Image (cartoon, rainbow, N blue to C red):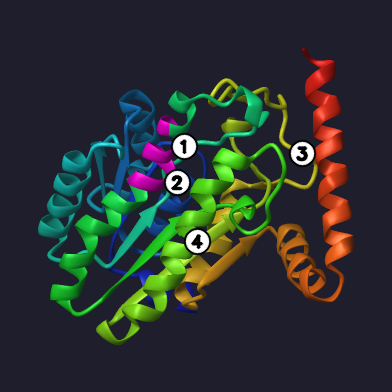
Amino acid sequence: MNAVEEYFRGKGCAVTGAASGIGFAVSEALLQVGAVVFMADRDTDTLAAAVAQLGAHAGRVYSSSVDVTSQEQVRKWIEDAASRHGRLDVLFNNAGIGGTMPFKDVTLDHWRRIIDLNLWGVIYGIDAALPIMLRQGGGHIVTTSSLAGLIPFPYQAIYSTTKYAVVGLSECLRYELEDDGMHFSVVCPGSVATRIWGTPVLGERREVKPPPDAVSAEEAAQTILKGVANNEGIIVLPESARQIWLQFMLHSCSSPESIESQLRELARTRRRAYESNR
């Protein structure tokens, strides 16, 4: 039995945004190492199809229609999962949406939508799971952020606002609650090949295909589970994204003018791309 199997086998794991993409891949990977998985998504039809694909794991996989912007739905789902399994060991706060667009096009409705999903959805999950985990002596809360939660990419201001927020939230709680048996990890993916690349989000223009360096959701899930099992605080993937982050941190201290130059050039490149499509 490897370290990931040892960590997750028999544990009760709850996953939001589980019908597709990283959420589905994480759910499937958890089942493969022997976990009991509670999948939640607001897209009921896609969730039902996803669960049907996991028929080989019947008896260890459960699904619920949950809108993470509803505190009551999140609370009830998490409490039901803990009650059914007898405890809640790991919560994956994975549900969220993208948001890449010119800031001058951003409306308050855009702000409300992305904050409700990407930030309040995470807060509701932590608020519901933490008391349960503290009563049972500990647990692990994993939140999906983004490389844009570590690096201020231009044209992603509203998205980065929410993703920087959940990085800070996870990191603060990681140290504050460690002596209470709690563990926190935040996942910061770069390019992962999921359907979001071809789906308009918040009215933004999107590439039809993922970028060439994108990894599969299945590969991302393996990296995530390994990082969680190793109790890593910040899990950056794929390796190309991790190297970008490490270089950003290094040069932010040693050569800040180089970083600023690169981000300014990226801003100009994206500006030209948006203007050419108008």
Disc with the residue nearer the chain's start (1 vs 3): 1
What residue does disc 2 label? 23
- The residue type indicated by label 4 comes to Val
- The residue type indicated by label 2 comes to Gly
Closer to us: mark 2 or mark 4?
A: 4
Disc with the residue nearer the chain's start (2 vs 4): 2
* Nearer to me, 213 or 187: 187
Closer to us: mark 3 or mark 4?
A: 4
What residue does disc 1 label? 20
18 is higher (above) or lower (below) than 231: above
- Marks 3/4: CA distance? 24 Å
Disc with the residue nearer the chain's start (3 vs 4): 4
Decide if residue 97 is in sight here. Answer: yes
Q: How crowded is the residue under tag 3: few (<14 C-alpha within 10 Å), some, or many (20+)?
A: few
Q: Give the quadrant of residue 172.
A: bottom left
Instruction: Give the secondary structure at mark 2.
Output: helix
> Residue lying furthest bottom in this view?
179
Q: How crowded is the residue under tag 4: few (<14 C-alpha within 10 Å), some, or many (20+)?
A: many
60 in the magenta segment: no
Task: Locate residue 131, reporting x and y percent.
Answer: 17, 66
Whether tag 3 and tag 4 are in contact, CB under 8 A, the answer is: no
64 is higher (above) or lower (below) than 203: below
The segment highlighted magenta reads 112-120
Check the picture and name the quadrant holding the N terminus. Answer: bottom left
Q: What secondary structure do most residues of the magenta stretch adopt?
A: helix
Q: Residue at x 64, y 33 (%)?
A: 100
What residue does disc 4 label? 167
* Nearer to me, 47 or 173: 173
Q: Which mark is residue 58?
A: none
Instruction: Give the secondary structure at mark 3.
Output: loop
Q: Give the quadrant of residue 53.
A: top left
